[in-house]
Image (spheres, helix red, strand yellow):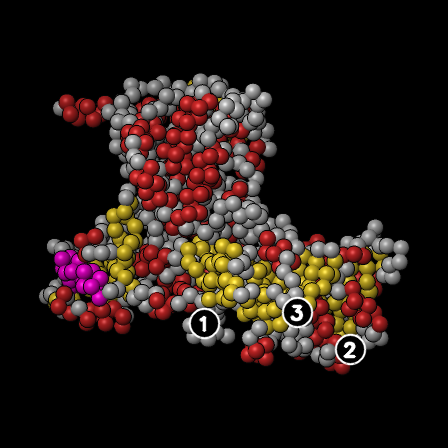
Amino acid sequence: MCQPNKNIYLPNLATIEAIVDETPDVRTLRLVFQDEAVRDSFSFRAGQFAEYSAFGSGESTFCIASPPTRKGYIECCFRGVGRVTEALRGLEVGDTVGVRGPYGNSFPIEEFFGKSLVFIAGGIALPPLRTVIWNCLDLRDKFKDITIVYGARSESDLVYKRELAEWAERDDVRLVKCVDPGGAGPDFDGKVGFVPTVLEEAAPSAENTIALVCGPPIMIKFTLPVLERLGFGDDSIYTTLENRMKCGVGKCGRCNVGNVYVCKDGPVFTAREVKAMSQEF
Amino acid sequence: MPQIITEENLRKLVDLLVKEKKLVVGPKKSGSMVLYEPLGTGSELNLDTLPRRSSKELYFPVCEEILRFRKEGGVVQVDDVDRSRFPETVLIGAPPCDAASPSILDAVFSWDYHDEFYLERRKKGTIIGIACTKCDDACFCSAVGLAPDAQQGSDLFLTPLKGGGFSCSAVTEKGEKLVAAHAPLFSEAASAEPVEFPAQGMEKLDLVMIKQWLSGHFEDPLWESISDICIGCGACAFICPACHCFDINDEGSPDNGVRRKHWDACGFSKFTNHASGHNPRDVQNKRYRNRIMHKFKYYDDKFGKTLCTGCGRCVRACPVGIDIAEILNTINGK
Amino acid sequence: MNSKAEKIKAASIDPAYYQAVTDSIRLAAVKLLEAGSVSAVIGYLPGRRTGTASPAVVTDPEQAAKLIFSPACVNNLSLYLTKAKKGVLKKGRIAIVAKGCDMRALAGLIGESQIKRDDLVIIGVACAGVYGRCSDRPARLDEESIARKCRECSVHLPEGADLVLGTLPELPEPDPSEARELARIEAMTAAERWAFWKEHFSRCIRCLACRQVCPFCYCEQCLCDKNRPQAVEQSPRPAGNTAWHLVRAMHLAGRCGGCAECERVCPMDIPLNLLNRRMAKELKELYDYEAGLVPQEKGPLNQYKEDDDQSFIK
């Protein structure tokens, strides 16, 4: 994991190859590493994150949103909320971004082989699961049923709109799209309701199924009981936690939830592990 | 036969090491206090007073560059820091509460990812520890498993003797090498009677019991009662030999700037603040609880060590008199 | 007893005076709580170490009976009435133990509409002085151990308090070392002064104890914590440290009550009160304004009036 005398805080340089504005305030950057050796060797697992630099402003932590099965580039997806994210949004195609990573643990995809998968995400929390979704779709025959329940506050807040359409088209994926009450336009072709409610209605089977959940704390809070009611055990539910991070490598002491370092012991946890944590996240 | 060194020779050792172009750091009078500072001569070495700040900054500086970035012809260049230029350093005159700190911090700075800023300095650093001949009512090293004459963390350990001078124990190979390289300064004595070590006010704490209590009392009225008066500054964390939280910031401009890491503290109100505005530790009790938990439970969970050396600096420095030794005593009594 | 010993004894404060204040505070606090006139009393409780005390917000009479007043009661308790300590404010009518220097802070906070006078029962203390930082904390407060600010105290009797407890003993006349130091620095050349402060600020570690202990630093978000824009560099380096301290001195000009807590709590012994004291002098010279025991309108740098002197704008 570490070469001798290597500076662990030194990022790789990547060029912005493409920019997609998912929503008015959420942007995807497609990045290609400038160093050929890094381009060829960079690999990661779904669920891992990286520290992205806007030089002069600082670093910000986002998951690696592209699937590990696609080589040659990585993607990150973020909302402009502060100094670094706004600086990243100020960059153009051809500009340089620093990338440090991949860090953290990952979804144990191999343990999901032969099972069905239910992905549940809200708003800007789709990116951490999107990497897993494509990872699994790229290995589609390894899994049984795949269900995706995804919602946002309003239609315009849905991210990866093009891919949602792709997933809807596929007959080997069941996509249930929704927006909060009041968030649907006249042509909206999904359900209206909060994600936990829509999930309960969709009632995916819990038999031999793994549930992967990612969303704001309030969504998680109401989704876990629904999954419980549907018959999912705490070891069959996976989530990815977020916390304020800086170093990403377990040194700066910022991201711990109790004695669990989100950057090292996570960010992927089972519901059992989350329930065992000190409740300070 | 015990090995000894006279005080005169100890100061000569400093002079010799300085001549060898080593960075010699020791307690030195600095304005109104004593601080760990580079020594120019042996006469500057002050062995009477505990320095106001800990010696952790020899390995974990208050502020240091970790990379530089610039734009050259529109192309971004990122430059590493040349760590080969870190000087060979000898820390001389560190009491056990300071000498032990790197041996505690090594674990986190080499946890899977190696922080070479810390580790390179450690590699190039030698620690000459010295036993304590006095203590005040804030000291509690004995209570947390150290002692006025604990050799943990020292490469060479000096014990003041009755009648002057010090007995020397080479604790590590580095210590042996240091003695061998300056053999004429050391001599053997028929006997070496150490001075009496001061007894500290506090009884030994049962750290295992304390950790157990902490494990079961994340929610407890104790947290509010002890930390309601905490004002959320970073004094305790910054002068502590064991606290090691840091922040990373870019300064300058995208065309020409520096990325640095510098000390941070979990006591600050925005330490865990998310960009969304959500703050898991939004009130001071939660932040103070984290301090105690990290030092006496989490660090032990992860690395098998207590993140405290009982130096008492936080007790002396706290603006509102929060006394961590008293808190530990209270928990021990539960 | 020879005359030298007598002189030394006379130059120190009899602990009996402090004990008397302690007894009065306990009586008053217990009475207030038992009668339900206040929901909490902010005072001092003794620390584990001899000669130390900590602020305490006591809500039950049993705790109130343990409150003390001693030379260890250094804290400016008005800090606990500010926005920074929201929990205490919500409790209702509060009693607070206040020395004269603390009263200036209370007066300032009331003047800035941070607290309402009616919400307070001010238990004033006729204060003979408190320990300076780095003192040995002897049983008798003396020339060596008394705080710098106490040497020139003009507010031994906190006028405007609801109660004034304690009878001042005969007070020694300690050497006004702070005034002397201020004069020494004022007599320096600009280059010497710059070197003086540069040396001090280079030792600042940005623990922000100075800010956190100050009753007037109650901004919900400190300018120096913002990163858009980054007005002051966050890293603890000489330039940013200097900027930090100068910004704070400016923000306190005309508001600082001179409790000198910032200087006391600085782990690096930076003589911050000299800055604040000099600023107070400037405000007095320029605008004839000074912090006092009586709540006033906001200070001259905190407000704008139509008839403000504009002659300096050329």
Q: Residue at the location (53% across, 51% down)?
A: B271
Q: Disc 2 is attached to a residue of which chain?
A: A
Mark 1 and mark 3 on one chain: yes
State the CA–CA distance, disc 1 to disc 3.
28 Å
Q: Nearer the viewer, residue C81 or A125?
A: A125
The first of marks 1 and 3 along the sequence is 1
Helix, strand, or loop for circle 3? strand
Q: Which residue is mark 2?
A: A144
Q: Which residues are magenta?
A: B4-20
Q: Nearer the viewer, residue B79 or B268?
A: B79
Callout 3: few (<14), some (14-19), or many (20+) C-alpha neighbours within 10 Å?
Answer: some
Asked if B141 appears above or below B227 in the picture, the reply is below
Instruction: Tell me, yes or no, if residue A153 can be seen here.
Output: yes
Q: How many marks?
A: 3
Q: x, y (%) of residue A220?
A: 70, 58
Q: Which residue is mark 1?
A: A6
Amino acid type shown at disc 2: Lys
Q: Which residue is mark 3?
A: A17
Helix, strand, or loop for circle 1? loop
- Which numbered mark, 2 or 1, is in the foreground of this view? 1
Q: Which image quadrant: the N terminus of chain B? A: bottom left
Q: Residue at the location (45% across, 67% down)?
A: B80
Callout 1: few (<14), some (14-19), or many (20+) C-alpha neighbours within 10 Å?
Answer: some
Q: Is residue B221 left or right of residue C147?
A: right
